[in-house]
Image (cartoon, rainbow, N blue to C red):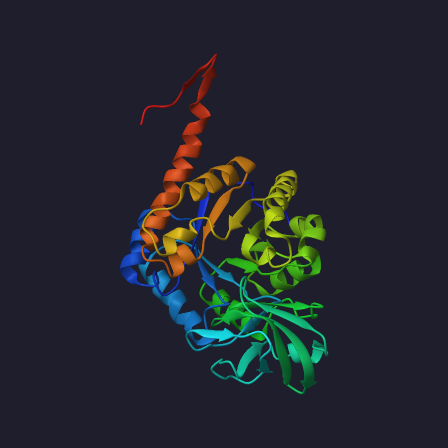
Amino acid sequence: MRHVPPEVPLKIQILCTLGPASMRPEIIRELDARNVDLFRINLSHTPLERVEPAIELIQGCSSTPICLDTEGAQVRCGEVADGVVLEEGSEIELVADRVVGSTASVTLWPATLFEALTVGSLLEIDFDGARLRVTDVAERRARAQVTSTGRMRSNKGVTVAPPPELPALSEKDEAAIELGARHGIADYALSFASNADEVARIRSLAPQGANVIAKIESRVGVRNMDAIIDAADAVLIDRGDLSREVPFELVPYYQKTIIRHANRWNRPVYVATNLLESMVTSRVPTIAESNDIANTLLDGVHGLVLAAETAVGIDPVASVDMVLRGIGAFERSTQIRLEEDELELPAQ
């Protein structure tokens, strides 16, 4: 029997990622006072041993629900020393064991990746990082040549071609879901959802009646979007990871298409990545970012997701305030009337 989702909410929701900049009682309370709808713990950036303390801290300061966002089927590099740049023509060792990344070696996980690597496999680290070509493969390690100069930073996503087959949930994901269930968490996000079976898998591990958010952020996820949307309670479009597989200029059109399909299936749909990226280091956004929020709301989304802005930004609360202002402007826009040549705006 198909899972029957809740009715699509009328209120535009704010999903707020907590991290080093915001995982503090005073910040959590300020965000809670602004009625954010969901606090997101990103398991890709949270070691398993820190998941339970994070849950307990949030629940001790706020009644806002928590969402555990899984690592999912993705490849990432491990810890990397500051300022590492890989130069074209150099060689680097890729290992499954934990090392501090340098120009000589770097950790890649999950370790099962090395079973899928072959000579000629291509890797790209982060959005604008180094590109590598595998030249030799051994058990739990490989050698690669740098084919394009670029920086390398800790815990960044790695795109691999041809893509390896990875489990939908890591062992860490499954352990975190078990922790979440013990603490009464009812919201879980599946990263890199590829098909309906993967949605069913996380639902089988989550507490009964849990809300499952399927993240569409890959080509295969887009191809199977209708089945994924049908199986999930809500959908989240992660534009950042999607842009690893889709040309940047096409991402807005993928976004619009996924939103249309989600609305057709009557599922809440959220959009993440770069909504207020400049506010990671600045207290004001760009006009382009304000325009992006407006157009995303006009596309028909039901929620906006703040990631780096609130996890590592200089002022998480100001970022939420800016989103609230954007939502307020969107809600007031229904009062705008165009009469002949005169545009009447609501009073400020």
Residue 291 in percent (x, y) is at 46, 39
- Name the residue located 34 percent from the left edge and 47 percent from the top edge: 284
Residue 2 in percent (x, y) is at 69, 50
- Name the residue located 47 percent from the left edge and 82 percent from the top edge: 100
**Which residue is more in the foreground, 184 or 264?**
264
Residue extending farthest front: 89
Image: 48 above or below 253: below
**Which residue is more in the foreground, 161 or 46?**
161
On the question of residue 301 being in view, the answer is: yes
> Is 123 placed left or right of 37 in the picture?
right
Res 259 → quadrant? top right
Res 327 → quadrant? top left
Residue 105 in percent (x, y) is at 54, 83
**Which residue is more in the foreground, 66 or 165?**
165
**Which residue is more in the foreground, 25 or 153?**
153
Image: 100 above or below 211: below
Residue extending farthest bottom: 139
- Name the residue located 31 percent from the left edge and 48 percent from the top edge: 33
Image: 150 above or below 326: below
- Name the residue located 57 percent from the left edge and 77 percent from the top edge: 108
On the question of residue 11 being in view, the answer is: no
> Is 109 placed left or right of 281 in the picture?
right
Residue 210 in percent (x, y) is at 55, 56
> Is 297 placed left or right of 249 in the picture?
left
Residue extending farthest top: 340
Total tally of numbered discs in the picture: 0
Q: Quadrant of the C terminus?
A: top left
